[in-house]
Image (cartoon, rainbow, N blue to C red):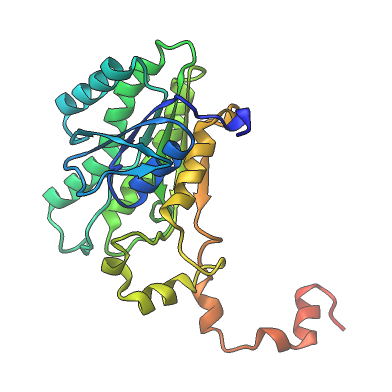
Amino acid sequence: MDTRFSLDRKVVVVTGGVRGVGAGICRTFLQAGSTVVACARRDSDAPVEAAGRVAEFLPCDIRDPDQVQRLVDSVVERHGRLDVLVNNAGGAPFALAADASPKFHAKIIELNLLGPLLVSQHANAVMQSQDSGGSIVNISSVSGSRPSPGSAAYGAAKAGLDSLTGSLAVEWAPKVRVNAVVVGMVHTELAHLHYGDDEGIAAVGATVPLGRMATPEDVGNCVAFLASPLAAYVSGSTLTVDGGGERPAFLAAATVNEATVDEAVVNEAAGEKG
């Protein structure tokens, strides 16, 4: 492996790392030779493993300051250091903003914004004391930069996470780099809850310019890049991983045939009248 990308023997914590995108991120770091600790409120039925290596599991509710402190203390006690934190835990069930309760909205903000800030604070305290510093990667969402009907509080929290990423990158430099991966649609084991059966998943994937949804490992590869020496001069950045985004809805709704637009209209638009 190119030494510039080496993550061998790095100690990595991935919140929400036992399933879905988090598990994919864990597998990527395991394949890169890292020691990986996955945390979540509950462990998965099967261990997260790759390349003959298994991620450790530590229980933690990232919204609870005491549990977060115990998590970071346990990692340092076991391994002597903490090199990379991936703030992946988050999410939200579908709920229209007008119908959801204030308590519901508060919990979504707490999980997707305040929780990552809390874990980052404790991780930063360790990383600042290390000669090699550390790297924090926040898992954000395209919902933070476009309308997010049915998950408005989630989108607002992710927008806040993007802003937080830039602020922490300035405050905690030069020892700690802080970046974010802005994720689009991902095909996980729970994809059917959002997109329906296999036919529905394929149809939704076909709307992406690259023709498919991301895999958890697609996200993991980008996270690993940001955590690696290859990104040593990257901090305060957001890397969008969405397969090219979404085709604008107006293109499908327009009645004009793009391939046969009247040449006169084109010339007029270009200022070449007459």
Taking the spot 44% from the left edge, 37% from the top edge, the residue there is 29
**Vertical arrangement, residue 12 with respect to residue 259, above or below:** above
Q: Position of residue 193 (x, y in %)?
A: 26, 67
Taking the spot 35% from the left edge, 61% from the top edge, the residue there is 148
- Using residue 181 as the reference point, say whether residue 257 is left or right of it: right
- Using residue 43 as the reference point, say whether residue 192 is left or right of it: right
* Res 56 quadrant in image: top left
**Vertical arrangement, residue 80 with respect to residue 257, above or below:** above
**Vertical arrangement, residue 258 with respect to residue 6, above or below:** below
Q: Is residue 236 visible?
A: no
Q: Position of residue 3 (x, y in %)?
A: 61, 28
Nearest to the observer: residue 11 or residue 61: 11
Q: Position of residue 9 (x, y in %)?
A: 45, 24
Nearest to the observer: residue 10 or residue 207: 10
Q: Which residue extends farthest front?
A: 52
Q: Quadrant of the N terminus?
A: top right
Nearest to the observer: residue 77 or residue 95: 77
Q: Quadrant of the C terminus?
A: bottom right
Q: Which residue extends farthest right?
A: 274
Q: Position of residue 142 (x, y in %)?
A: 43, 54
- Using residue 18 as the reference point, say whether residue 211 is left or right of it: right
Nearest to the observer: residue 100 or residue 25: 25
* Res 116 quadrant in image: top left
Taking the spot 28% from the left edge, 61% from the top edge, the residue there is 190
Total marks shown come to: 0
**Vertical arrangement, residue 43 with respect to residue 177, above or below:** below
Q: Is residue 49 visible?
A: yes
